[in-house]
Image (spheres, rainbow, N blue to C red):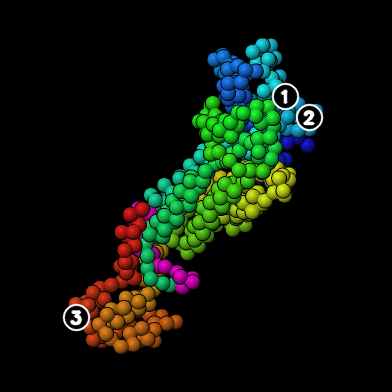
């Protein structure tokens, strides 16, 4: 059976493949190989500038050629590396051999072939490559997608800032809010989550087999290899990697920054699960309607249905993403002694975790763009919930020293159907200033929204 979108084992490469076209070049094995070539080239060129008599500085033409290998890296190049791997059974060594093959018939480079992968352990190349992948995945896919959701939610918060809505704490009628304020709450939470994702320093180490520069110092004992490695890691691309240097490690970079990043993404995802479930509920209550799409079917047997599938898809895929992200953040910082291989296979699933997240972000944004507010349903709900005004009435009573204010309102309203007339009769009987009576009499469930409108417009 040939591999197609119909035969792919993962829905990310099957049913949803088209939606992940931006992530695939970054987080696929092709993306991983590409970054490995980039790291090897950066290290090789830096070695030529280190001042070693045995490796003279490369010419401008040679540097341009090497940078071209990175810039123009193709699927055919990746396939060629995989051919080397059939013999080596080692993917990093296959990259080294492929690079050396590209030096053939170029005397300047052929003379320096042994400086490819010089003093490096595989993890010097792998951890830096994963770091480059993660930085691109975060900056080019995750953060832009979350920014688009924040932008849409802010737009909706401002548009509906003054539209009153009945709150439902514990699923029961509660003090009114506005649609915009409830969306603004999510905007603020997401902004904080995004700041934490963006603030994680993407780290990398290049310090040899157990983190002590053993091989490096065996070759040149008097050279400052730590400063050299730091320079390669932190010098901006393309001559360096533009990452944050990790000075202490075992054979592998400790992966603590990865755990921090994955936890931060998972936190944003949890906020969006909360949002997806709330909107699902509001659609169920009729607060929101969904724009119809010609030809779309909601049920194979119930023709009337317009299901909130985008929010359901978002919730489900966010859950899958978080399951993987949480495993990654718990597992990756743990390695037996100086190295075990349990991280290697797990790291190959970073793209899967981010893929489910990216898919969810897309579904959620699609759903938000379909929503239409049903103000009539909101108003009807509010008009049937006069009991929520028990709160302001008893609070004003307490201000003026009316004894047992809370208890009196509880007796009149708890578990009972309350009408405007019931409350107005009670208000008129209160021993409070007439101006306060008039203010309470003018109040409706729809007008009792506090600072909600102001807060919604502020985000």
Label 1 element class: helix
Pointer 2 and pointer 3: residues touching (CB < 8 Å)? Answer: no
Q: How much space separates mark 3 and mark 1, taking CA atoms?
A: 91 Å
Q: How much space separates mark 2 and mark 3, taking CA atoms?
A: 91 Å
Residue 88's disc is 2
Residue 434's disc is 3
Label 3 element class: helix
Q: Residue at x 35, y 57 (%)?
A: 456
Q: Is residue 378 above or below residue 133?
A: below
Pointer 1 and pointer 2: residues touching (CB < 8 Å)? Answer: yes
* N-terminal label among 2 and 3: 2
* Of 175 and 406, the residue lying toward us: 406
x%, y% of residue 362? 53, 45
Please state the extent of the stretch shown in magenta in the rendering. 157-172
Q: Is residue 379 above or below residue 431?
A: above
Whether residue 435 is visible, yes or no, is yes
């Amino acid at each position: 059976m040939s591999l197609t979108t119909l035969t792919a084992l993962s829905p990310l490469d099957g049913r949803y493949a088209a939606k992940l076209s931006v992530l695939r070049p970054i987080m696929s094995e092709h993306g991983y190989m590409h970054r490995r070539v980039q790291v090897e080239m950066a290290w090789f060129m830096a070695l030529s500038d280190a001042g070693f008599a045995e490796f003279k500085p490369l010419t401008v033409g040679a540097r341009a050629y090497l940078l071209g290998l990175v810039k123009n890296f193709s699927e055919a190049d990746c396939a060629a590396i995989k051919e080397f791997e059939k013999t080596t059974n080692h993917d990093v060594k296959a990259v080294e051999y492929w690079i050396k093959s590209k030096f053939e018939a170029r005397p300047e480079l052929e003379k320096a072939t042994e400086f490819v992968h010089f003093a490096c352990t595989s993890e010097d190349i792998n951890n830096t490559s994963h770091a480059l992948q993660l930085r691109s995945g975060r900056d080019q896919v995750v953060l832009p997608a979350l920014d688009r959701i924040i932008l849409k939610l802010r737009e909706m918060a401002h548009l509906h800032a003054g539209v009153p809505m009945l709150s439902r704490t514990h699923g029961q009628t509660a003090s009114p809010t506005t649609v915009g304020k409830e969306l603004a709450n999510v905007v603020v939470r997401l902004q904080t989550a995004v700041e934490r994702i963006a603030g994680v320093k993407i780290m990398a180490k290049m310090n040899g087999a157990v983190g002590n520069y053993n091989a490096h110092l065996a070759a040149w004992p008097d050279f400052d290899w730590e400063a050299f490695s730091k320079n390669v890691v932190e010098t901006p691309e393309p001559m360096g990697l533009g990452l944050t240097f990790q000075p202490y490690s075992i054979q592998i970079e400790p992966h603590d920054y990865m755990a921090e990043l994955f936890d931060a993404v998972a936190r944003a995802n949890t906020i969006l699960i909360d949002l997806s479930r709330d909107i699902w509920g509001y659609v169920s209550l009729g607060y929101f309607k969904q724009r119809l799409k010609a030809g779309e079917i909601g049920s194979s047997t119930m023709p009337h249905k317009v299901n909130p599938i985008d929010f359901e898809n978002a919730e489900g895929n966010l859950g899958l993403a978080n399951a993987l992200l949480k495993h990654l953040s718990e597992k990756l910082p743990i390695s037996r002694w100086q190295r075990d291989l349990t991280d290697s296979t797990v790291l190959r699933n970073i793209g899967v975790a981010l893929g489910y997240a990216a898919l969810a972000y897309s579904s959620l944004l699609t759903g938000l763009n379909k929503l239409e507010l049903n103000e009539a349903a909101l108003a009807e709900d509010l008009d049937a919930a006069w009991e929520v005004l028990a709160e302001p009435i008893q609070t004003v009573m307490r201000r003026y020293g009316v004894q047992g204010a809370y208890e009196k309102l509880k007796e009149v309203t708890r578990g009972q159907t309350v009408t405007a007339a019931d409350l107005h009769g009670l208000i008129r009987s209160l021993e409070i200033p007439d101006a306060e009576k008039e203010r309470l009499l003018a109040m409706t469930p729809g007008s009792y929204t506090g600072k909600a409108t102001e807060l919604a417009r502020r985000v």
